[in-house]
Image (tube, rainbow, N blue to C red):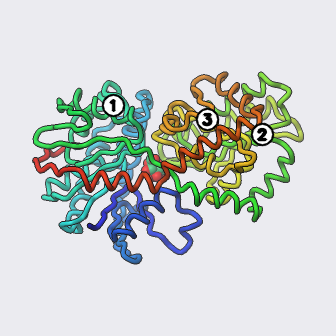
Amino acid sequence: MRLVVVSNRVTIPDRYEKATAGGLAVALREALEKYGGLWFGWSGAVGEDTRQVQRGNVTYAVTDLTEAERQSYYLGFSNRALWPIMHYRLGLTEFQRSDYMGYLGVNRRFARALAGLIQPDDVIWIHDYHLIPLAAELRRRGVTNRIGYFHHIPWPSADVLGALPFSATLVRTLAAYDLIGMQTELDVRNLIGGLVDLCGARQEGRRVRLGARETLMQAFPIGIDVEAFRRLAAASVRRAVTPLRATRESLGERKLVIGVDRLDYSKGIVQRLEAFGQFLLSHPEQRGNVSLLQIAPPSRSDVPEYAELDRMSDEVAGRLNAQLGEFDWTPIRVVKKAYSRTALAGFYRRAQVGLVTPMRDGMNLVAKEYVAAQDPADPGVLVLSRFAGAAQQMGEALIVNPYDTHEVAEAIRTALAMPKSERIRRFEQLYHVIETTDIDWWRRRYLEALTGVPLSTGAVEPP
Ligand code: F6P
């Protein structure tokens, strides 16, 4: 078989890739190198270019988006309608018919381009919410290959998703897939409920029958390359990477609490800053002893809700620093830039507490990276939102409700005061979980399921 991966963004690897590429990109690339294959998607650029680049036995086929497509398909329907509603944020969901038309248009255009590149034995693996109707469009063009979908973000219940205009039509297109992978069991239950309630599908265990087609739904919690990240963290300490050296100088013996997230409202950054402020207010003896470093590289800044978050995080951090800071101690540092993975690994290892408190998250790989980066002889403590998919696997973290500022504040205090023996016990259990369900395990399980699933041959209704 040959593997075809399709994702919204495709980064063609260059010789610097090792330092910057994240776990998922590397894992998919490794799978493609193993089977030989094709990676298709958006180049990330605005323009009119399409090109193919060969790297070893992998072809990268990328296409630009026009500015109108970027606005409607990417910023509009994907990130102002689907993203908030999938994260249970009905109040932030902005629906425009023209955006939905643009979204369908790009999926149609991708299907047209991709159909010409597909070979009879290809197994096609499509990723994420930008591309939900892609398989239906490929089927319309006569593609009968196995097609799998993996949804990287949460899937809400039918009564939430049902508020999105055209949601039933969109969800119905999922019948074109042979296998649908979700991050958690809850997502699978919600998805099946949605297909049944919104589209009248029939459920038989994990299989859903819609019209003439049958699709298998299953949870495949995504992981990280634990060993590679552990090595990166150890090396960053040995090599005293520059930002770490500077942190050491500016923090001295002070403890460090760390948060690392794209600047996205689903990540609960503002609520986290407030919780840290609450912790300092409730425990004045801790002032001057500990700082919060929030690394938050900007994301989707053209979307108004993200620009608003940018402003609010500055405002809250500024207010708390002015209220609680001292001439020689800054309680909160928000750094809005991206760091290399080596530097991040080093920051995680230096931090006594990893604060991963999204309001809702598909999995959250920062939780796993934080654990992988710890010193096994003196590990830090993970504080984890119960609304991150990772919480289903990582019960030995301090599990919190991110909507409860006091609870998060108390978890920070508990984490900072936790005896070493308990930290080691929790760390060992967490490490075992992430090591046995790493990125390689995820990819293998998914591809085994996709190649083993019985093929359904019925026709699919177009969106
Ligand atoms: O996890 C969801 C996701 O959309 C990924 O597909 C993507 O890598 C990440 O968020 C960043 O989003 P964007 O591609 O919009 O910058």
Nearest the viewer among 330 and 156 is 156
Question: SS at mark 1?
Answer: helix
Q: Which mark is residue 397?
A: 3
Residue 442 percent coordinates (x, y):
42, 51
Q: Is residue 31 above or below residue 158?
A: below
Residue 304 percent coordinates (x, y):
49, 40
Q: Which mark is residue 135?
A: none
Q: Amino acid at mark 1?
A: Asn
Q: Amino acid at mark 3?
A: Ala
Query: Residue furthest toward the right?
Result: 327
Alpha carbons under labels 3 and 2: distance apart: 21 Å
Alpha carbons under labels 1 and 3: distance apart: 25 Å
Question: SS at mark 3?
Answer: loop
Nearest the viewer among 375 and 321 is 375
Going 58% across and 28% down the picture, which residue do you hit? 402
Q: Amino acid at mark 2?
A: Ser
Going 52% across and 32% down the picture, which residue do you hit? 359
Where residue 415 sits, quadrant-wise, is top right
Residue 207 percent coordinates (x, y):
22, 38
Disc nearer the start of the sequence (1/2): 1
Q: Which mark is residue 190?
A: 1
Q: Is mark 1 within 8 Å of ligand 1?
A: no
Query: How many callouts does the rendering have?
Result: 3
